[in-house]
Amino acid sequence: MGKLWVIFVALISILLPFLCNSFSPETPTDRRVLVLLDDFAIKSSHSLYFNSLKSRGFELDFKLADDPNIALQRYGQYLYDALILFCPSVERFGGSVDLAGILSFVDSGHDLIIAADANASDLIREVATECGVDFDEDPSAMVIDHTSYAVSETEGDHTLIAGDGFIKSDVILGSKKINAPVLFKGIGHSLNPANNLVLKVLSASPAAYSANPKSKLSTPPSLTGSAISLVSVVQARNNARILITGSISMFSNRFFRSGVQKAGSPTKHEKSGNEQFSTEISKWVFHERGHLKAVNVKHHKVGETEEPALYRINDDLEYSVEIYEWSGTSWEPYVADDVQVQFYMMSPYVLKTLSNNKKGLYSTSFKVPDVYGVFQFKVEYQKLGYTSLSLSKQIPVRPYRHNEYERFIPAAYPYYGAAFSMMAGFFIFSFVHLYSK
Amino acid sequence: MARSLAGFLVFSLFVSICGAASLFQPISESHRSAALELFTPDHGSFKSLEETYEALRTFEVLGIEKKPDLTASACRSISETLGSPSSTPKDLFYALKANSIAKCRINEKTSEGIITKLNAAVSGASSLLDFYYSVGGLVLIKDQTSKADVHLADAEGVFRSVKAFSQSDGRWRYSSNNPESSAFAAGIALETLAGIVSLASSEIDQSLINTLKNDISKLFDSIEKYDDGALYFDDKLVDGREYQGPLSTTSSVVRGLTAFAAVTAGSLNLPGDKILGLAKFFLGIEAPGDAKDFFNQIDSLACLENNRQEFLLVRVNTVLGSSAPPLTVKLVGAYSSGSKDKSLVESQELKFEAGTGVHILNNLPKTIDVGSYTFVFEIVLHESEHEKIYVTGSQTKVPIFVTGLIKIENAEIVLDNDLGNVEAQKKLDLAGQNAVSLSAKHLQKLRLSFQLTTPRGRAFKPHQALLKLRHESKIEHIFVVGNPGKQFEIVLVKYLLFHRLSTFLDFLQLVDKFFYLSGRYDIELTVGDAVMENSLLQAIGHVELDLPEPPEKAPRPPAQPVDPYSRYGPKAEIEHIFRAPDKRPPKELSLAFLGLTILPLLGFLVGEKSGT
């Protein structure tokens, strides 16, 4: 009974982060998204994007960014699971929403999409900075690229960029390759090198730079080359996901429908990659992909099935865990060959890659080290684009008891022999000495 | 565009411009890459000299840098053909044509031999093609050698004998015994005649030229027309062998016309819309998939372009795209984006072409060079009652970018020592590959300079001219190329970049900026502008910098972002190393010693026994 209780507590402690998460596995389609807009024209000019979200089951709540009635939480409960900020020029949010409110919204595991443009306000820039990316500080700067711009009849200043520097990650951008370049027109940002949670999803070409296209360049631009990120994502430690882009128009119907031809390339794509890109990345941001869960963490001695309360040094043990990935509708077995378990006390004593049976069950076996103390089974799984798994389970390891060593050692036979022959000799000598006349 | 217009029915202007540059704007990057795909030599050379010429000419027109091995292999086959005694005038003609671009050296003797050979061919020629090749060859060799005595002895006689092939409808026959005439042959004949005129030692009779001009206008009567206003020449399919297809036929006529127009003094009276229609035809084809067609298209466009026909097409329609009522479009002014006050053109009306519904402005003023401009148009409705129905913007401003190929010349990288003497000087080919390797100390100066000129010969300052130095540790330093005060040298801009590593102050600043990091720096140059068609990003090479040791309080280089791909991934496995078991003697040894320990007891027992 006690053991069951321990298992229950352990399972709860493992599952608790998931239960508290914004992600609700039971009803993933029932997600409420707050969309803050500069004006309602964006609702119609970006309707293809919003419709694709709606068709996937999201409830979109459109509000003006300066609407005095907007609120993210009421009575300590969040009203929404995700927030879309399509309001680049807002100086102050209405209602109770402010910078701190948005940050605590993210800190509690909710998702965020930020789209800025050339006249992004300080508020939007601050939100982005808090998320680990810095938009170009020059308010008139735009990303310009004279070598990989999109050929266009109406625009000649090369600020309409055909971006194809995608991150190599199937989980973020979907397994289907995005063939057509993505149209981008807006401001660039750079990643904070100290922040290792933020990833460049779409980076600019090496010849790009961020400057004001209308004025002469006298000082070196602050952002140049592939260091410019056009679209970035953040996956926080609590698995909240953030998408940041400097171009709100990349989600617009115009860019979704427009054809694209990259300068210098003979192929003219009928349709730009924007729709595929935005849809796929929104699937990732809203946890329809790349979300892992681990269940049934088990360990026991080889040949047994019961989980012991403690191990003795040099025991052989087996460890297993089941990992599943959310596919948008159901939990599918997760297959990878880089899940590792650590047997850990202050530092890992054993680090072993788990083998899987392609049905989500990962297992391995190893010998308990000959060091005693309080160990942990630790799975710290981090993979590009996936939520991180962090499991740990404490287990004490004891040394041999005194009766668990071997009883007679051959090397000690001469000593045994010497002692006993001495005793026998003394006994015989005494006997002979006493009774011989 | 046309954002300033308001009202319930608004006109919008669609403007396309045939560039004032060496190219039409519609010929763009896609053409360049298509050209590179189509003209790929087999094992370094083309099958024939004709193909070589077509490839070289296309590359030249499109501003694609020739690969040096291509030119070298072309030169080899050119000199073979020119030197061989068995080459026909046709071979010589194409060899010389290829040479006009490849610019290989022909020795004096060979050229003399060719001249006599071609002169003999001219006098012995009986068909149009014979004349074409031999006369064409003579014209080409005249341009390529220093000898000025290349001329036709009886130019007028030859002219007349070529003229004899012409037909009354403006088409030409290939030979006197072949009754079929074609427009393709007309183009060839015109080119030949132009060659004869240029080779003539005395003036050709003006009446001959005038009849020829009449022939040309007759030829234009047979021009065919597409619905969209594109004009082309085509021959009726009479003989499969000689039928060339509309593209080559039109191309041949255009070549002939431009050659002829170049040598005759009086202008050809060709209406501008005809030329425009031809240009439209070539542009309408986009990029052909066949090398020959591609060449024909590009060459003809280049010919038309040399004729300095530049157009501004304005289409006026309602917001829903239906065609507009009769109206006049006026160009009120054109302003360069920099200066708003002075108009570059005087106000003029655009010609309306009824067939296509396009308003045309011929001959953009020479003041319009590459750059971005704002053109201001005014729309005047012809009938006053229409003014109640339509609303026009009083003045419509249309931003226009005139793009062109910018010539990059005199690129060099110079390393000065601390006394200002040149230590190393390397020429750079900014359109090709560079691999400069330099090594410098902190007391030296590095100077990179190059000149940019627009197709109209003016100095050009690009928006983006950045030099990037990247240290091994991925730390980048960016410099804007172009030093005010030093950059204007009479006409051309010279961009200078000084790494002032010489003066004490600058040395400290720059060394500080470089974080005292010695080692290899890769040099990368980016030159680009919205109106520059050949924007480039070039790795120039690298420089080994030897900088002094950092002082104690030197700034640390900033942290560089970690590559996301390397951050994740499995870690190396850790196996626990178990304590090795104690070393023990073999069991036999223990048993032997056990025996030894028992031995004294046995000895005692034996002694005891024997004692009693």
Image (cartoon, coloured by chain):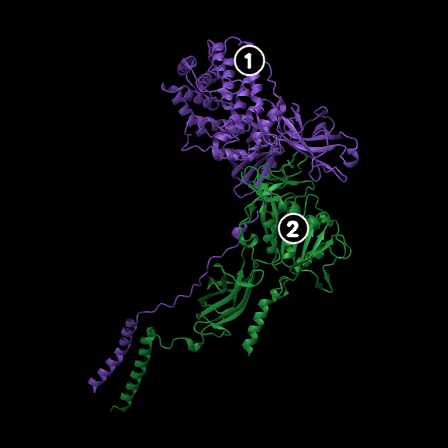
Residue A352 lies left or right of residue B478; in this view the side is left
Report the residue marked by disc 1: B209
Instruction: Residue type at mark 2: give it.
Output: Leu
- Kindly tell me whether residue B167 is visible in this rendering: yes
User: What residue is drawn where x is 48% and y is 75%?
Assistant: A306
Q: Which chain is green?
A: A
Report the residue marked by disc 2: A48
> Quadrant location of the N terminus of chain A?
bottom right
Tell which of A236 and B35 is nearer to you.
B35
* Vertical relation: B413 (above or below) A27: above
Residue A288 lies left or right of residue A123; in this view the side is left
Hue used for the chain lettered B? purple
Rendering coords of residue B178 (x, y %): 44, 20
Rendering coords of residue B112 (x, y %): 41, 13
Tell which of A114 and B502 is nearer to you.
A114
User: What residue is drawn where x is 63% and y is 61%?
Assistant: A29
Which chain letter matches label 1? Answer: B
Instruction: Residue type at mark 1: give it.
Output: Ile
